[in-house]
Amino acid sequence: MENRRKPAPPAATLDINCDCKEAIVDYLTRAFPTRQMEEYVDELGDVRSRPMWDQAGNPVHNPQAEAAREQLIEHICAMPPIPTALDALLVHYGVSAVAEVTGRSKRLVRDGSGQQRLESRSPRTNLAETAAFMTGAKRILVFSDAGGTGRSYHASLDAKNQQRRVHFLLEPGWRADRAIQGLGRTHRTHQACPPLFRPVTTDCKGEARFTSTIARRLDALGALTRGQRQTGGQGMFESSDNLESSYAKHALHDWYGLLAMGKLKSTSLAEFHTMSGLDLTDQDGVLREDLPPIQRWLNRILAMRIAVQNAIFDEFLTLVETRVAAAKEAGTFDIGVETISVEA
């Protein structure tokens, strides 16, 4: 008798690129400036600009700006995929070497032949991954906020894997309390050796904007919770890393003054105004009293070319370090609340 059952169709091969291109293209489509502007004279006689509208009340767009946007989108789409940090680690080291403790329920993994497959995950998967790391079966552990509370990844004396933990702070986020929670997962009591904390940044000096914010909040949280600022940041950050401190604000004012006098090598006053859009002088060419605050200055620096960012930050950080060193030498440096031991 002939077997009429048909063989099962072959499994579909997944070929999915998970990167940030779609978000970038969507942002450019919505936010790229293409509106045509027109000049007009207000009631005070000043020349200003405003968006142009046609006779039917529809917005008028600049054809050259639209062409530039389409060219930029085409260039971005032609670039190779940019994986997330977590997926890049899994691809580079392999799922057999990396323990993942996150909150995602599915993930794409590559097998030995390079094909992708969709893998489901459950809360029990995180427990198994944690056990694999603590026993030494997997040498690398990646955890997110979902695995940063209520778990222990330190070199416990009760665990088989008692090697020193090297904790890379890849994405600290904006909340200092969660950052401390994550740091505390690898630094606990009853451990064979303390961990090494290593914040991760690139050679783009503009990223100091993000490390500065987390450094400031860690210092503030440490001063509130422990009475000692160094405890909050676990000693990872120095005083010059906090670019929102009083020393950095005074250093920025010095930087503005040097820029106005033309004593900076990184940029000139006219070039900085063109690149940042910040008005630093009044009609007489004198520095304004209400200069842009350091948060706005840092955000505008991020939009500049990397070479210009690095040159500006090198000069600015030199001024910050000079301010901090002068305060320490004069004995006026603010180190927060200290515990002073008194001999009986």
Image (cartoon, grey):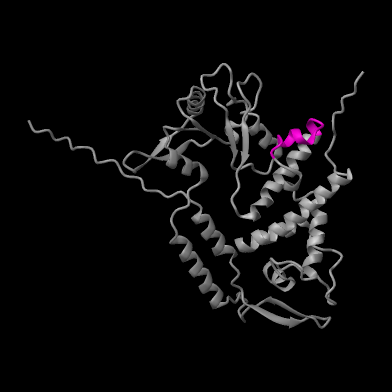
Quarter of the rendering containing residue 253: bottom right
Q: Considering only vertical position in the picture, is 268 above or below 202? A: below
Q: Is residue 51 left or right of residue 339?
A: left
Q: Residue furthest left?
A: 1
For the record, the magenta segment spans 224-236
- Residue at 71 percent of width and 34 percent of height: 234
Quarter of the rendering containing residue 12: top left
- Residue at 48 percent of width and 30 percent of height: 139
Q: Which residue is at the front of the view, 63 or 145?
A: 145
Q: What is the x, y in percent for residue 184?
A: 65, 29
- Residue at 48 percent of width and 61 percent of height: 76
Q: Is residue 225 magenta?
A: yes
Q: Is residue 271 left or right of residue 202?
A: right
Residue 101 seen in this snapshot: no
Q: What is the x, y in percent for residue 20?
A: 51, 53
Q: What is the x, y in percent for residue 293?
A: 79, 58
